Structures are given as structure tokens and as C-alpha cells.
Image (cartoon, grey):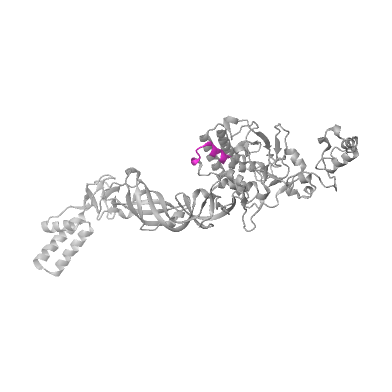
Amino acid sequence: MLPSSSLASLLFSVKLPLLALPLCLLPLSAIAQQQADPHAGHAHSQMQSTVADPLAALQPDSQVYTCSMHPQIRLTDPNARCPICGMALIPVPQEDMAKDETATAAVLRLSPRAAALLQTQVQPVRLSKAEVKLNLPGSLAADQSRIQTISAWSSGRIEQAYVNRTAQTVRAGEPMLEIFSPDLIVIQQELLQAKQLSASRGSLPAGTTLDSARRRLRLLGVPATQIEQILNREQLQDTVTISAPVSGIITDKWVNQGAYVSTGQPLFTVMALDQLWLELEVFEQQLALLQPGLALEVSLPAFAGESFSASIELIEPMLNSSSRTARVRALLPNASGRFQPGMLAQASVTIPLADTLLIPASAVLFTGKQSLVYVQTAAEQPHFTPRQITLGQRVGEQYQVLAGLNEGELVVTQGAFRLDSELQIRGLASMLNPTATGGAPMVHQHGSSSTSSTSASNSVSHADHSMMERPEGGATVTPVKPSSAFVLSDEQQAPLLAAYQQLYLGLISDDLSAWRQGTLAMQQAVAGIAWLDRFPGLLMALKAGEGELEQVTDLESARALFYRHNIGLLRFAELGVFAQGWYEAYCPMARDGEGASWLQPTEQLQNPYFGPMMLKCGDVLRQFTEGA
């Protein structure tokens, strides 16, 4: 048995807290020393020992832990909590923190077990021919080249009106009205006198006068057949008949029977319907595929089950700045008269593409201005790297790739969001945080003298840990003051927070419809706020799923979007931008045991991840208070 002095020396050399051993095993000198200096065995003491730690060889390599909400945090204490949000930390495999030295982007290296849990699937990039099918909405309109205005050839009084209402159908050559004109009688008399002179003398002046009278009658609108009748019968006519120049419908009528009209006065507008315009709305990225003369297949809801043919006549050179569409005009024959202007129509066209690179649509992550895919760097190893690509046309359930990928490369078609989340946790460049480098993480090691020399911006004090750590089983809420000068006004916050509360209550009650309405209202409120440029990643989180809410048909998918939205919401609340007085709650069982935090308006815990089934599961971590 060791002497008391030897046992004490050994205990202090291995830096074990004396209180960890029963008092009956401690020598009196050691007990006295412990009472004199209660911090003698604490890992934070400044005691320096030249004796090597005999238990160091039994300890595993230093494990780093991080916060799933704040991946820049790096701690080595497994029992610590995030100094920002107070969440429990998760381990980060050291071998997965490396970067591929030959690549410019971060490489995510997964163990086979981790890859199996992420359930990723890959497909090779294919070089193949493809066909782009465009479905273009539109409507029928009148052919402006088939619209004619009928005017009075001479002044006079309308004796008889055969057309007396709009929308009336007329045929070419059909009389529309008769106008009594005194000038007509005078010119007819000159015509008959010139005929008599020409017949009796056969002189050139008489023939010239006859031709002049004919032309004057033509200028009054008298048709040639009517002029010949006047010459043959030698009877004067009191009125001139105005006939329809084309077949169509009367769209405008400006005169009535008995009215006096002057020369050139508009009388009717006739629109021919034997040919119509089909006006289509085409997005600007589709314009390059279309050209005049291209044949279209047209369907109309008014004639279900039938298809018709049309051809593109014109692509208007002006783009609508609001809808980002251009109008394309096609000619649609209508000899039967079945079609009417204003009818809705749908045109489709199939355009072949030359050999091009194709990837599944599910492989692409859209970050606003950029498109991202995850590429498996080796077929045998679950190593993945993000790759920015340039997309062309969408071909069914595939996208055309213009740049960024090569034929045969393996792209992730399922599980890309999980890989992106893993990169965020490790502090590497990801979709939501493309500027992360993964280097110089914030690491705090209890009992290490090097921690005290870390810069103030990259260190966490022991007092910070004490503030955030809650007593076991307790529900202490730690107030957090804002750290941003940018704050939304009450008028800006009100619709945003009201919409969020609606979707939050919808998940609590398992009401998918209420969640969808609230999420749509929240994203509309976000779009109506003038944000600063320094929040691109947080705004991207708030806009997750924008335009695709109708495709969310189950609560599991809704809660997955809810998790992404809270990434931005909690960070904005932490910065003091909005939601002052609201609370952050955490459930370690959410998301299949990965844990999740959320924003809630009251201190009463209500878990949106489990709804009525486990409404009280979790803890309230902190309250976001207003700045002083």
C-alpha cells in the first residue's frame, strides 16, 4: 500500500479533482489542501505541472462539437451548449473536416454508415438528343388586317338603312344603306347627255365627257354595274347604295336612318372572321426556341378533344417588364366561323435539340441567381462536392446543362438538401452559406491555457457557458439582447409575425391548409420588406419553397420547410431585427432525433414538430428582448 504522501502526489500529478474520490481514501494532508483551495483540481486553474498526464494515452483524439444552428461554433466539451442559442452540440468527425487539396470547393467525406443514413442516390450525366415541348397559353383576337371602316362617298341623307345594329353579320356585296345625294342626280344627267352627244356626233369631246361622268359617279361610290344600268335604261336614280366590302360582323355603327352625312364620314366598321390571330405569352428564356413560320398545335377549351393547326407569324420585339413575357402572334384559319375573338387557347410545339448534356431535375438546388448540384467525386467512395452549373431548357423531368458538368459525372438526385445541411453544420461552403471556408473555427477547450490567448472575436468565455447552461431539469429562460442596428418597424413586423403565427398554429394542430396559408402570407410579407444586402443567406432560408407550396401535400414536408424557415427567423430574432419578446424553444427528438429549434410567441411550450401527439416535448431556451 502506498504511503499517504505518495498517493496525494499521484493524485495531483494526474490533475484529478479530489472530490471525485471518497474522503476515506484521501490522506489528511490532501483533504486540508482541498479545503484550503477549492479550485485546486478544476480544469480551468492556472496550475502548471511538469508531470505528464498518465491518462492522456487512454483518452481518444480530441473530438470537436458544433451547433446545428450556428456551425461556426466549435467546442471540445461534449456537455457544453451553444453560447449563442443554448442548443445541445453534435459531434463533428475530424476526418470529414478536410478539404480536397486539389479542388477549390469543399469536399464532404462521409463514412459508409453516414451515407446510408443520408439515403443519397446518384445518376450519371447523359449526353443525348432531346425534345423540348412548350405549352403556351393564349387567346384569340381579331386579325387587324381584316378590319375595315366604311365611310360615306358623298354627302346626303340616309334614305334606307339595311344594317341597324352592331354584331350583325354581313356578306361581301350585301347592301348596307342608301344615301340620297343631289350631286348624284346632276352627274347622272351629265352622263346621259354625254352619251347622247357621243352617239349623234361621235366626237372626241363627247367621249371624254362621258368618261369623266363615269369617273365622277365612281367617286361617289356608285358601282360599275349600277352605272351601266343607268346608261342602258337612261333613268336617273335618286340614291347611291353602299355595300359591304367584305364578309364579317359589324363592330361599330355610327349613323341611323334619316341622318345627314358628309363626305368621308365613318358609317360602319366591319371585322372579317375568316382568319384570326392567336396571341401567345412566351417567357423570355423560351424565345430563342421560336421563329416565324413554326407550326403549332392548338387546342381550345370551347372545343374539347379537337386540335387545330396554326403557324407563327410574328414575335413582338417588346418584352413585358412585369410578367417577363413577350407576345407571339400566330395565324389561325377560321373559314367555318366557329372561332370567336376572346376565346382561350393553348398552343403546343415540340422542338428538337441536338446532342446535349441532361441531368434529372431533382438534382438541382436553386439559390436564386445560381444553380447548384452535388457531384460524387469517386464512384466507390461517398465523397461529394458542390458544383455551380449553368442550366438551359427544362426537358420534361430533366434539365439541359450548358456548363459546369461533363458526361458521365455522378450527380446526387436524392438527398442533396441533406448533404447541403451537413456542409452547413461543418462550417463549409454550402447553398445557404456560400462564403464559408471551414477554416479557423471557433474552438473552446476547457482546461487549456491556449484558450485564454484566443482573440475576443473567436473565443467563448467560461462565463458565457455559465449563462447559457440551464440546471438539469430546469426551465430557466435566458434573455438575449439584440446585436443589430437594423430593426423592422411595428408596421413591417405585424404582417410577418401574424403570418408566421398562423402557420405555427397550423402545425401545432396538424392543419396543413392553415400552414400553407400562413406560409404564403409570410413569404408575401418578406417580399414586401426592403432588407439590407447583408442578409442574403437568411432571406434565402425564409423564401425556401417559394412558389411550390401547393406541391407540399403532407405534414412531414411542411415541417421540413418550417425547419428551414426558422433558420432565418431565429437568426433575425437573435440580431434584434424583429420578434422582440418572442421565445426560442428546442426539441431534441424533432427531425428523427437530430433536434430542432423554433420561434414561438409565448413562453408556454407548444411543439410544432409533433403537434397534438407530443405538444409539450422540448424546452424553452431563451427570450429575445428589446435593445436598451
Please indicate, yes or no, whether residue 297 appears anywhere in the rendered image.
Answer: yes
Q: Nearer the viewer, residue 471 or 488?
A: 471
Does residue 140 appear left or right of residue 540 in this picture?
left
Percent of width and height locating residue 379:
56, 53
> Taken as a whole, is the magenta stretch helix, strand or loop?
helix
Q: Identify the image quadrant of the N terminus.
A: top right
Q: Is residue 551 magenta?
A: yes
Q: Is residue 531 left or right of residue 330?
A: right
Taking the view exactly as shown, the residue that stands out farthest to the bottom is 204
Locate the C terminus by quadrant. Answer: top right
Q: Percent x, y for residue 486?
A: 65, 45
Against 308, residue 627 (above or below) is: above
User: Which is more toward the observer, 71 or 143?
Assistant: 71
Is residue 39 shown above or below 259?
above
The magenta region covers 550-562
Residue placed most toward the observer, 603 or 613 = 613
Q: Residue at x 32, y 55 (%)?
A: 145
Which residue occupies the extreme left position in the image? 200
Q: Indicate yes or no whether the magenta region holds residue 547.
A: no
